[in-house]
Amino acid sequence: MRVRAWVDQPPANPSGGVVENLQPWEEMSSWLTPNDKFFRVAHYNKPVIDQAGWKLELGGWVRKPMALTLAQLKARPRREVVFTLECAGNHGFPWFVSGIGTARWAGTPLAALLKEAGPQPRGTEVVFYVSDAGEEEVRQIKMPQHFARSMSLADAMNPNNLLCWEMNGAALPPPHGFPVRLIAPGWYGVANVKWLQRIELRDSRFMGRFMARDYVTIREEQRNGSPVWTETSVGRTLLKSAPARVTRKDGRYNIIGAAWGGP
């Protein structure tokens, strides 16, 4: 059996380290993507975190703020989920065609921890702050910022969301968010934040760079014959599919592919 390579191979990756480890579609050979072949995206630095000194903080508009070590998180009820993670930018550029992977993720449900913390009535937005940071310029003012994303409290309470410390049966690799990341099945990769540091309930919509300026979908709509442009923050995944691997044996071709996303 011989694997047939696609003739329209993507051009070289020009992202400068933001996107890494993209794999050729035709080399797909298993449903679960091995950790060392899983794509990686990091907009700021790639922090190396000392597990001994790390704690996950949970605060804001909650009745019971808390800080948990990795051992305390692992002592909580464990759950596994198989989830296909796709970058929202996948297929958005000619070179970006394989920003997708499937893994068996393990951790503890986020909803139970939020419930234990006791959200106050004003706490309607859950913001996930992480360790990687960079410098941003807003209105000609430069300031350090941590990567952060948010979702509504109702979305965060989905029982499928995990505070994840394990990937395909192994400790979460550093490039994929060690010691703990968020896994939110049904959401694009940008919402599945890595290197999680703090969870905060706020009383207003979070409007950081990766919610309000980047990762925004812009669409033209018609209103009485005039164009109106709408902007929405990238969140839940859409249904997509792709032919991936073609093999030839004894003069016959076998084509397999993948479909993912959507409800």
Image: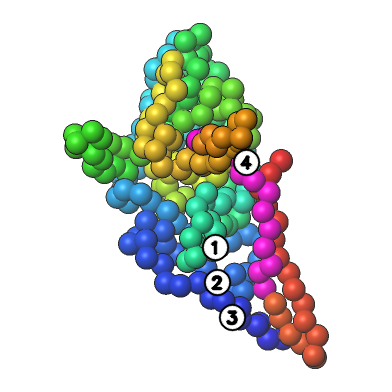
Q: Find disc 4 in the rendering and name its residue.
A: 186
- 34 sits to left or right of 250: left
Question: Callout 3 environment at 10 Å: few (<14), some (14 to 19), or many (20+)?
Answer: few
The three-letter code of the residue at mark 3 reads: Val
Label 4 vs 1, first from the N-terminus: 1
Q: Find disc 1 in the rendering and name its residue.
A: 98
The three-letter code of the residue at mark 1 reads: Ser
Image: 214 above or below 41: above
Magenta residues span 230-245
Q: SS class of the residue under badge 3?
A: loop
Q: Find disc 3 in the rendering and name its residue.
A: 7
* Mark number, residue 24: 2
The three-letter code of the residue at mark 2 reads: Pro
Alpha carbon separation for disc pair 4 and 1 = 18 Å
Tell me which corner region of the image, top left, top right, bottom left or bottom right, holds residue 194. Answer: top left
Alpha carbon separation for disc pair 3 and 4 = 32 Å
Q: Is residue 32 magenta?
A: no
